[in-house]
Amino acid sequence: MNMSGIIKDSLRYPFSDWKKILFLGLIVVIYTISINIIPFNIHSGFTYQFLVISLLINFFILGYFFKIIQYSLKNTKKLPKFSNWVNLFKNGFKLTFVGLIYSIPATLPLILLTSSLLNFYLYQPTLFIFIMGAIEHIHPILWSFVYILYFLILFPISLIAIANMAKNDGKLSYAFKFKEIFDKIKNIGWIKFYSWYLLTSVINYLIFLIGLLIVIISILFHTYQIEKFIDALILTPYIYIFFSRSIALIYKSDQNNLN
């Protein structure tokens, strides 16, 4: 499938079943509410309870994201059912784990350097001003490096890793078969792959702007909470579904039809 076909199919796909979009939207709304009502006191027992609830809901959302990829790889045309909830939670946990592992090369240097500067300061308190000045100037550069490394290199590769795991019955090890993953991207074509990544990112950003416009209008008409609810109910699940579908289609679009 060419790029135009991938994007058109992915944009239409969420509309294959409005009921499932709205159901996923309700889950996103519940997740949003659980995040917003977490107490500010980190030592509060309620804080940990709401954090656990939010985490479980997030696993469920990611699990459905993964299920869409699995079904799309099998050429299904409709959204999958919300069935086998235990499996959804398990797969959501796997996706979270994969995301964390793939983020390590970007975040680890920042953590190590920051901790090194902190330790140096603790043992050399008279150099406080020098250290704080160094951190102030180094951190923006480091954050820029982390951002570029993660979002332009690690994150897109992790998406193919997730699709590779979905293709192989959700087996976690397939997300870390790096030769297989890079061969897949090579067969897709690096230019085509990054063109897809940038194009889908632009589409996601445009949908985000629609949500932002809704928020601005809602503020003007004093209906912010209602519009925020609509954004979580419709726009966010649409982005989830569109993006997961497009991941599966770009994975299947390799030149040699491997795997």
Image (cartoon, grey):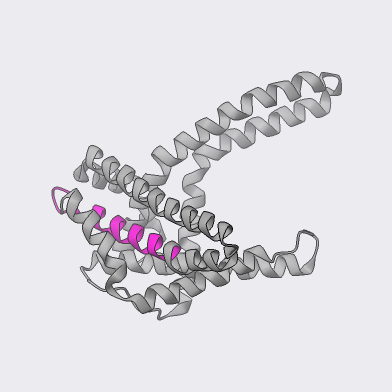
Instruction: Please provide percent x and percent y for residue 252.
Output: 21, 56
Vertical side of 122 occupied by 219: above or below? below
Tell me if I can see residue 77 in this picture: yes
Tell me if I can see residue 258 in this picture: no
Farthest left residue in view: 256
Which of the two residues, 245 or 253, is positioned nearer the viewer here? 245
Which of the two residues, 195 or 159, is positioned nearer the viewer here? 195
- Magenta stretch holds residue 130: no
Left or right: where 133 falls relative to 186: right
- Magenta stretch holds residue 245: yes
Instruction: Please provide percent x and percent y for residue 14.
Output: 32, 67
Vertical side of 140 occupied by 101: above or below? below
Q: What residue is shown at x 38% (from left), y 50% (from top)?
A: 206
Farthest front residue in view: 221
Query: Image quarter for residue 22?
Result: bottom left
Q: What residue is shown at x 79% (from left), y 59% (from top)?
A: 41
Left or right: where 90 falls relative to 49: left
Instruction: Please provide percent x and percent y for residue 126.
Output: 86, 19
| The N terminus - image quarter | bottom left
Q: What residue is shown at x 56% (from left), y 62% (from top)?
A: 221
What secondary structure is the magenta-colored segment mainly?
Answer: helix
| The C terminus - image quarter | bottom left
Farthest bottom residue in view: 83
Vertical side of 189 occupied by 62: above or below? below
Instruction: Please provide percent x and percent y for residue 20.
Output: 38, 76
Q: What residue is shown at x 60% (from left), y 34% (from top)?
A: 110
Tell me which segment is drawn in magenta: 236-257
